[in-house]
Image: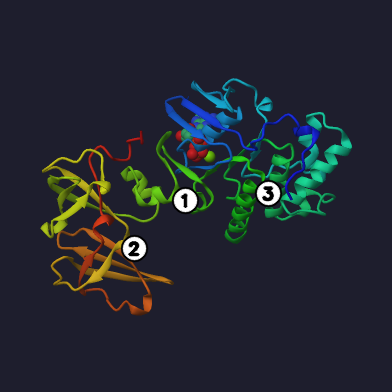
Amino acid sequence: MVFAASPLHADTSSTAGGAIEIKNLAKRYGSVRAVDDVSLVVRPGEFLALLGPSGSGKTSILMSIAGFELPDSGSISIDGRDVTYLPANQRNLGMVFQKYTLFPHLSVRDNVAFGLKMRGVAKAERLRLAEQALATVRLEGYGDRMPAQLSGGQQQRVALARAIVYRPKVLLMDEPLSALDKNLREEMQLEIKRLQSQLGITVVFVTHDQGEALTMADRVAILSQGRIQQLDEPKALYERPRTRFVAGFIGETNFMPVEVQSLLPGGALVQLPGGANPTEVRAEGLVGNIVARGDAVGALRPEQITLADPDDPAALRAVVNGVIYGGSTVLCVAQLTDGTELRARLPDPSRVNVMAGDCVGLRWPVEALRVYGADAGAEVAAS
Ligand code: ADP
Ligand code: MG
C-alpha cells in the first residue's frame, strides 16, 4: 500500500521523513516555565515520543513545532530551514489530536480531502488521494459515511488519513489514543507504527502513557517541568535512568538511602540500609557526583530482587509485610531492619511460598543497584 509517486510530491527529496532541530526553546505563561531551554534533534524517519506527567510541557513543545504557539526564545528548524516564525499552514506538517476534530457535516472522504482542497489540488486527484489515504488506514469503503456513523477508533483513523493525505514529512500527534479504550488503543498503537514505517515519515508523539511511549518510539524524551530529563532509547531509559526522576517515572523502582563508604576504581562501596552488607557498585551504576562518606540514594527494580535464605551472608535480611498476587507475578513487600520497605516482583506465583511475618533474605545481581548522588535528582536535566 505504498503511495505511488504523484505530481503533488514530485518535488520532494528522496527521504520521506523530515529532520527537526529544536535549539534552546523556551515558552512561559506568566510565571510558569512551560518549556525551559529544550534542545533536541529528531532524525529523519524517527518515531520520537515526548513523555511526561501532565503539565510537563509536552503540548507546548508540539504546538511550537506545529506553529500554533510562538516560543519566547530559541529556534526550530525542519530539514535545515528555520521555521520558528513561519505560519503553521506553511510548515507542511500533519497533525492528529486527542479529539478527532472531524467536520461533522462532511463525509469521511471529504474530511480527508479537505486539506488537499485548501492546497489547490484538482478534484479528481483529491478524491483519488483521499481513497488511497483511507486505504492506508484500512478504511476502504468508508468514504461515503458521516463521522457520526463511525466508532471512536474509526474516527481517529480518519483523522490520521486526513493528516497523511498530503504526505507531510513530519506527523505530530498529541495524545491521539487517550480517548480510546485499552484494546482499541493497543490495536491503534500497532497500526500507527505500521503506518509510520510504511510511509517513512518522522513522527513526534506526545503521551503521558509510558507503556505507549516505550512500545512505539525509537527514542523517548522524558519531560518534567518543561525540561528534558533524558532522551534515549526505551531500553536505555529503563536500564540506565540518568536521574532519580526518570528512575521513578519509568517502571517500578525501590529507592533506599545508602551511604557511600569509599570510591573504588570504576565503582564504589556503599552501605545498605540497616547497616548490613556493604555492596560494591560498578561505575555504570553510579550516577552524578558520588563522594566517599556521603549520603546517596540507591535504586533497584523490583523484578531484579530474588528471595534467599535469611541467613545467606550475601543477602539483606528482611521481614515480609505482605504478598500480593498479580497474575503472572507476585509482589512481595519486605521491610529491612531499619524500616525501609523494598518491593520484590517474583515470577512464577505457584512457586512463591512466603507470607506476611516470614523472615527472608533479599538478593539481586550486583549491576542491578544504581546509586544516585545528590545532584542526580528530579531537577537535573540530562546534558
Ligand atoms: P502537557 O502537555 O505536558 O500536559 P502543557 O504544555 O500543556 O503540558 O503545559 C505546560 C505548562 O504550561 C502547564 O503548567 C500549563 O498549565 C501551562 N500552560 C499551557 N498552556 C497554557 C496557556 N495557554 N496559558 C497558561 N498556561 C498554560
Ligand atoms: Mg498536553
- Residue 347, by quadrant, is bottom left
Mark 1 and mark 2: Cα distance apart in space? 18 Å
Q: Which residue is denoted by mark 2 in the rendering?
A: 303
Q: Let me know if residue 382 appears in the view.
A: yes
Q: Residues within 10 Å of mark 2 (few under 14, many from 20)?
A: some
Q: Amino acid at mark 2?
A: Glu
Mark 2 and mark 3: Cα distance apart in space? 36 Å
Q: Helix, strand, or loop for circle 2? A: helix
**Measuring 37% from the left and 75% from the top, which residue is drawn there?**
349
Q: Helix, strand, or loop for circle 3? A: helix
Task: Please tell me which residue lies in front, 252 or 364.
Answer: 364
**Measuring 78% from the left and 54% from the top, which residue is drawn there?**
149
| Residue 367 picture location, percent across and down | 26, 55
Nearest-to-viewer mark from 1 and 2? 2
Q: Amino acid at mark 3?
A: Gln
Q: Which residue is denoted by mark 3 in the rendering?
A: 156
Nearest-to-viewer mark from 2 and 3? 2
Mark 1 and mark 3: Cα distance apart in space? 21 Å
Q: Which residue is denoted by mark 1 in the rendering?
A: 210
- Residue 375, by quadrant, is top left
| Residue 118 picture location, percent across and down | 79, 30
| Residue 4 picture location, percent across and down | 77, 43
